[in-house]
Amino acid sequence: MQGSMTAPAAINDRASIDSKQRQFLNAYWLRPENAFWMVLRSNVLARAPMRGPVLDLGCGDGVFSFLHAGGQFSHAFDVFSAVKDLERVLDDHADVFDHIEDDYDPKITEKPAYTIDCGTDLKGNLLAKASKLGMYDRLVHHDHNERLPFADGEFQTVYCNTAYWVDDIDGFLREIARVTAPGGTAVLQVKLDAIKQFTMQKHRELLGDRWLDIMDRGRLGSWPTLSDRATWEARFASAGLKIADATPFVTGTHAHVWDIGLRPIAPMLIKTMNAIHLHLRQEIKRDWVDLFSQLLAPFCKPDMDLFTEPNEPVEIQYVLTPGGV
């Protein structure tokens, strides 16, 4: 990991939060509910120790880590502009981003403050996109249900925000402990199954299976190891990972807003925006980002919760040390 290990610093002032929020909205504007969740993740991640060498497990297309590290894209680029084959996405609940064209060219106006030593992901198309960012020194195509292709203690910091996607979660956590150096840290951001309390799934009897299928688009089914806080912490202990810090940063209110979101109509929005003239698209995008920057501002706070009764958080960041260090 090159450059400043503490950049970007934890963000507390309103102007800095607004600036970061706009950068994420610029990239994810047609899914604004994802943008504010990523702002929450980025803000809490900035408080975690990050010493190199660093491993980013499940890095995807690298856009989150790029923006977190202070990188910026031009207004002309966003993650939806290269989306193709939307019929497959609609029919099969396929990943809308699992595709890359030969001319994929993210327009970078500000380089990130540092690079990450290594990123991994199951999807080769996403890694091909990540390779265009100059964010990773090395990218490895890998199924995280298998043994990690790294030496014992190879990394001082291991970061992952996709652990709940892995079927063999216990094996995966043991591998994280193995490749994290003694005295190093593993930073995991994990969803809790409390999220189910704040989705429309609990109203299945009233709404029906088809309605929920349209709304959910296969999300919950793709998180095989979603569980409660006690289960996550028991898994960590079993894998030889000791909790140094646990910071909840997503509430039931965040999950409620995210659940409703623009997910059901996103494919149609993407198709429409990608079909119009570039100048008009950018004009609409500017107005859109301006509007949602204001609408989402109150939600980019980790403790923002409109529910009066206390409830279990929906996502927690754990800072873990291997071998009980």
Image (cartoon, rainbow, N blue to C red):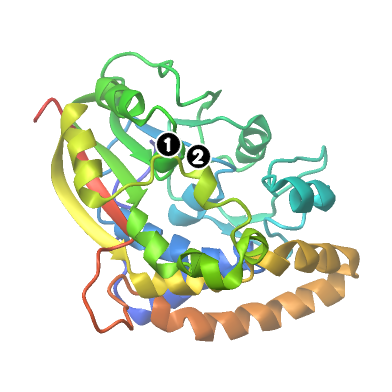
Q: Residues within 10 Å of mark 1 (few under 14, many from 20)?
A: many
Q: Amino acid at mark 1?
A: Asp
Q: Is residue 109 visible?
A: yes
Q: Residue at x 69, y 54 (%)?
A: 107
What residue lies at 23% left-to-right and 50% top-to-bottom?
Answer: 229
306 relative to 132, above or below: below
The local crowd at label 2, few if under 14, some if 14 to 19, many if 20 or more residues have their Cα within 10 Å, is many
Q: Is residue 291 above or below residue 62?
A: below
Q: Position of residue 47 (x, y in %)?
A: 25, 56
Place of residue 145 in the rendered image (x, y in percent of width and height, measured from the top left): 45, 24
Disc 2 on helix, strand or loop? loop
In x, y percent, where is residue 92? 74, 45
**Quarter of the view holding residue 16:** bottom left
Quadrant the N terminus occupies: top left
Q: Dividing the picture into quarters, in which one does residue 287 lie?
A: bottom right
Q: Residue at x 76, y 40 (%)?
A: 100
In the rendered view, would you say 74 is above or below 118?
below
Residue indicated by mark 1: 56
Give the amino acid type for the residue marked by disc 2 in the picture: Cys
- Indicate the position of residue 206 as horizontal and vertical percent values: 55, 73
For the C terminus, which image quadrant? top left
SS class of the residue under badge 1? strand
- Please, is residue 269 above or below residue 166 in the view? below
Left or right side of 90 for 261: left
Q: Is residue 75 visible?
A: no
* Relative to 2, 218 lies left or right: right
The residue singled out by tag 2 in the image is 59
Q: Residue at x 49, y 70 (%)?
A: 203
Estimate the spatial distance between the alpha carbons at disc 1 and disc 2, rounded to whole Å: 6 Å
Q: Are marks 1 and 2 in contact (CB under 8 Å)?
A: yes
Name the residue at the left extreme. 325
